[in-house]
Structures are given as structure tokens and as C-alpha cells.
Amino acid sequence: MRKLLGIFGLLAALTGSFVACRSDKAGIILDVSTAANLDPSVITALDVTVNGRTQTYAVGDVVTWSVGIETSAGSKDITVSGMAETALTAQWSGVVEAVDGKVVHQVVVLQAVANPPLDGGSDAAEIDGPSGGGGISGRGGAIESGGVGGGPGTGGRSGFGGVPGSGGLPGSGGLAGTMDAAAGGGGNSGTGGSSVAPGAGGGSGGIVIGTGGAGTGGATGVGGVTGAGGTGGAGTATGGAGSTGTSTGGTTGACNPNVLLLADTSTTTNTGLQAALQAQGLNVTLIQGGVSSYAGTPPPTDFSAVVVAEGSSYTSGADMPAAGQSAIVNANAGGVGVVFTDPPGFAEHASYWAVLRTLTLVTFGSNGSRAVPAYTLTVADHPIWTGLPPTFTSTVTVGIQDGVVSNGGTAIASLVDTKGGTCTTAKPCIGVAVKDGVGRIVHDATFFGYGTADWYVDPNLLMLFANSIKWAGHCL
């Protein structure tokens, strides 16, 4: 017995039965059944998604179903998900060509899903991996003349300057602390960290300190993280055995707005998100399906930050190529920011991301659900919260999950399901986790798009996401 579930109209309202297509309309009928190894009686509902828009149907006690879709002509990305209660049990995805004035039949065979969906599941928390290594410091400019250098310069937060040679190249400054000056070494200056104040012998500026030469001022040094900006202030470097010279600090770096977005296959949603982020001042290069196809081209070093938005691809059965994972990890060690959105915990659970998982900051706990969450900043004055109220409630439905911080991350915000459920007032979940360093990391522990496809219409969620990218890219 086959049951007609209804009409899912993309350009027209939902009706009770399929209507013959006019010449300016196209029709698709999905003939849905299950694979031989899957018991159809466990499926209680079908979620049918066409170009990012979802309709849910209760299926009753029949074993095959038909879904009629009235739409416009063209290619349609369609996903059919078989749900057991709220848990994803089986799924099919494909592209169907709709033709004006005609009805196209598409056979849909639901395949069992091995991985637990966001709406439930139980698994042990991921064991924290090792912390990422520190980045490589920038180098100061070459000097023209000078005496024997003094001691090494001390970096901003954690690194330490290189030992200068006699008239040789400058030692490297330490890793930058947030808005802290790094002291250059005597004689030949070390490369300063990110700062507004000058380091000894180095110049100061907006984001990155250049390295001053010793003796008779050497060539301008190159800043640590980003590109051109204003000229830093003058510093004085004293040679060990020579005379005192004056050097000019290197040019400071302005914000690099170029961002690489590796998305799932929800093409309509991803294109809308790209436009919304560009309206926030970011220059976004979008790769549709990049979370499972990116192999390192274009290079992540061409961008200030890489966004890995796993989205619906956590059930696709496709891992990101190892070359792409390694390119992202290596770029992060060199100063490129990385932003994750949930659910990477599922990808890790399925033995995906053998390399990339060393950067994720929130590991999936035991439960998840759709919700309208309230977010609260828990670390005062963090730059990611620029322009946001301390607490705000989403106006759209998104996916949330419990979990634990991993890989040396720090939670800066929590979230609570306003309707009760997975994340409660008594036991809130992680909202945002960060890790500061040469290459910054942000993990927004929200499954954006799981419930409301165009979630970015919520101005607070969009600003939270855009600020996460800007901070990871050293623009906040």
C-alpha cells in the first residue's frame, strides 16, 4: 500500500493533494520506500527538504509513501529523512530536474543511518586531544650596520626573542599577547607581538609591530600576522659595542577581510549566508560541499580565517580529504584563524577528521535537540560579543547539544533551551568556546540551519557568527 502524504510547494502554498501542473509549473513525485535491511515500521515521520526548505509528514502504518511537490523548473536539491520519533533513522539525498508542465517521478530508497542524529543519541565524551603548538614568530628586517647585539627581546605572551648576532639578522620576537608590546633584543630588534605600544627597538602600530634595525637603522621589518598599515613609532636600539642608532618600526597590519567558507550541500542557505556575511564587511569565498571535498585549494593561507560549517553533512558519510585537513591545521599554526560550527562532534564520533579534530574545542556529550536558545556571555568584555547584549534569545530555531570543552579551549558563553530540554538553567550548555594564540580558534557550539534554513535573518546570531570570524582572523 502506498500513501500520498501531500504537496510540498516551493512557489505555492501547501495543499491537500497533488494538482495537475500548469505550463508555468513543474511537478515532482517522490516514490519513497526503504532499503531491504531497514524495517519501515520504525519510521514515524518523513522530513522532506527541497533547496533548504523542510516539511515534516507523519507516515502512519504503511510501508511506502508518495510525496508530491509543486515547484518551478530547474535542479532541486532534495533530502528525505526517515525519523523515528525525533531521531534520524534513514536518509536519501539527490538532485532532481523539474520540467515545466510535466510531472517527474523520482524513486527514493531510504538507507539506514549509522551515526546518531542531533536529536538524541548516547556516546562517551571525546577524550581531549593534545593542545596545538605555538605559531612561528615573525622576523625583523635586516640591518645595515651596528655593533654586537644585546640580549634577546621578550615576546608578548609566551615566546621569547632570538639572540641577535654581530651585525647579522635580527632575532625573532616572541608570540604576541593580546594588545601587549614585545620587547626587542638589544642591538638587533626582535619582532614585536600584536600591540598598540612600541616594543624596545621596535615600532608600534595597529595590530602588528615591525622590527627596527640596530645601529644606523636597518630596513623596515615585516610585521607578525597581517599586511600593510600605518608606520610604527620610532625606537632606539643600542649596539653591544657600537654606537646608538635610531630605527623605524615596521608597518602595521590592517584587517584582512578575506574568508574561506567550507559549507555543506544546502546551496540556497549557503548562498544566503555568504551574502549576509559580506554585508558585515567580510569578503567570503564559498565552497559548496567543502566540508567533505576540500583538499587544500585554494590555500587557507590566502585568507585570514577558514570557516568549517559541518551542517547537514554530518550524515553524508563523506570525510574531508586528509590533504585539506592538514592544510587547515598547518595554516592555523602559522596564524590563520579557524571557526567551527556544530556538529563536528558527530564527525569525530564517526572517525572523521583524524587531523582536523585536534583543533575542535567542543566534543559532543550525550544529547541534542532543536531549540530557541538564550545565549549569555560568561567572560566579560570578550571582543566576540562586540555589539551584542550580555544575554539575548534567538528568534529562530537552531540545533543545540550538550558537550565538553576540549583541546585547551575556554568557554566564553553558555546557552539554555528556553522551552526546557537538553540545556537547562540548572545545567546550561556551552555556547561559544575560544582558543587564543598565533592562530586563533572559535567553536560556535550551535547547529545553525537545523530547524530554520535562513537562520541568519536573526541579527544577533548573524553578528555573533560574523564577530567569531573577525576575531579568529585578528580583525577584532
Image: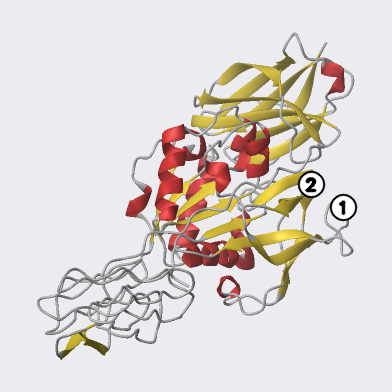
Q: Quadrant of the N terminus?
A: top right
In this rendering, is residue 308 above or below 373? above
Task: Note whether 90 is above or below 168 in the view shown.
Answer: above
Tell me the tag on residue 369.
Answer: 2
Type of amino acid under label 2:
Ser
Which type of secondary structure does the marked residue at label 2 adopt?
A: strand
The label shown at residue 470 is none
Residue corresponding to mark 1: 421
Q: Are marks 1 and 2 in contact (CB under 8 Å)?
A: yes
Badge 1 crowding class, 10 Å Cα cut-off, few under 14, some 14 to 19, many 20 or more, is some
Q: Residue furthest front?
A: 241
82 or 433: which is nearer to us? 433
Q: Residue, x 59% and y 36% (percent of image)?
A: 313
Q: Earlier in the sequence, mark 1 or mark 2?
A: 2
Q: Nearer the viewer, residue 21 or 433?
A: 433
Residue 168 higher or lower than 419, as above or below: below
